[in-house]
Image (cartoon, grey):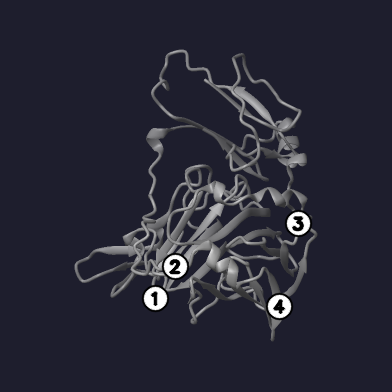
Amino acid sequence: MVWQKWFGRTSTVLSQGTFKQHTCSRRNGTSHLPTLSKEAFETMLTGRLFRSALLLTSGLLAVVQADTTPLTSNLNFESAEERAATTTFGYKEDGASWVIDSGAGLTVKVDQGTCDIASMIWNKAELQTWQRKSHINSGLGKINTSIESLKDKTIQISCKTPGLEHTYLFRPNENVIYMGTYHTKEYEMGNLRFIARLARKPMDNPMVPECKIDNMTAIEGHDVFADSKGITASKFYSGIPFIEDKVHGVTGDAGGVFFIMSDYAYERSVGGPFFRDMNNQCTEANELTLCMFSDHTRFEDYRYGFHGPYALIFNDGKQPAVSDVDFAFFQDLNLTGFVPETGRGSWTGTITDKNGVLSNSSVVVGFSNADAQYWVK
């Protein structure tokens, strides 16, 4: 049994065998395994990589599958051609906000002073709940923001405060909000997550029924609820192991909203391939979450650095494929902390199983250091 990690031109053979190659980026809609950053590679070569090395079999893996069946009653959506005919890609100022039009049907409003998303209009419905906005954690408060159109027409909104930089990116004729988040020790917080707070009327279906908390009473803090029959519901029931969590989202009469994670989305997170965290809670709002770091059952120190790329995609309710978005343009951006393909390398190795113990198992090898975590299946 052979596994191999790629670092570009450099590779290290751990034992003899015939190697199976895993390329290290996503191009033309093809998904590949991630590569290690140069920083993590150099740390590994000094012998300090293996704070934890895992050999895990499929028997340890339990996955909560998201229920993304488009349970909508409104199927009279405009076609892509109709949407494009009535909108033009670009942005404008509206008081203290920027309004971005995707040119394909999505309109997003971002507050200039806080970096909060204040409005998301899709399929002629306002998806943003009025009670609270969509943002990092519970909001970053007053923050420095800027907007610019890049050479390839990408619209970039940069939100900066000491210790944290969050970036929104919009591409012509894509109903997608691309994002990346850079975090250092200078900005202390117990969790790092992006929460899209969606209105229940147009977006009422949770990832799984056990996330829907209607007519229930809290029985454990503000996280676990129960009805009169003792049936419980909780945001923690929506967790999917990182290794399986490429796409998760919610649906409703206005279509669907989904997070799509790049190959590197979890390299700065903690917990390894089978760690899971809360992805969804359906209370007064349908909260769709990407947890980059949290203290929920944490057993590793927090990894600072660039989290992402990741994307929030809007469609008509069908679960998207990872290939529906293309993160390749990040290679040409100058985002703080982002490690491009040119700064990555590879590592190669073999698992020896002379007695065939693992012959009928799907094997996962996970490895990590203080800077990053990776795995190979």
Q: CA distance from mark 4 to mark 1?
A: 28 Å
* Sequence-earlier tag: 4 or 1: 4
Residue 13 is left or right of residue 286, and the answer is right
Residue 147: x, y in percent? 75, 71
Query: Mark number for residue 201?
Result: 1
* Sequence-earlier tag: 4 or 3: 4
Badge 2 vs badge 3, beta-carbon distance below 8 Å: no
Badge 2 amino acid: Phe
* Sequence-earlier tag: 2 or 4: 2
* Mark 3 or 1: the one toward you: 1
Q: Residue at x 52, y 57 (%)?
A: 259
* Residue linked to disc 2: 77
* Mark 2 or 4: the one toward you: 2
* Mark 2 or 3: the one toward you: 2
Q: Residue at x 53, y 74 (%)?
A: 121
Other residues around mark 2 within 10 Å, as few (<14) / some (14–19) / many (≥20): some
Task: Return the residue nearer the eye: 26 or 180.
Answer: 26
The secondary structure type at the circle numbered 3 is loop
Q: Specify the quadrant of the image occupied by residue 189.
A: bottom right
* Residue linked to disc 4: 92
Residue 31 to residue 13: above or below: below
Residue 239 to residue 100: above or below: above
Task: Return the residue nearer the eye: 204 or 239.
Answer: 204
* Residue linked to disc 3: 335
* Sequence-earlier tag: 2 or 1: 2
* Mark 4 or 3: the one toward you: 4
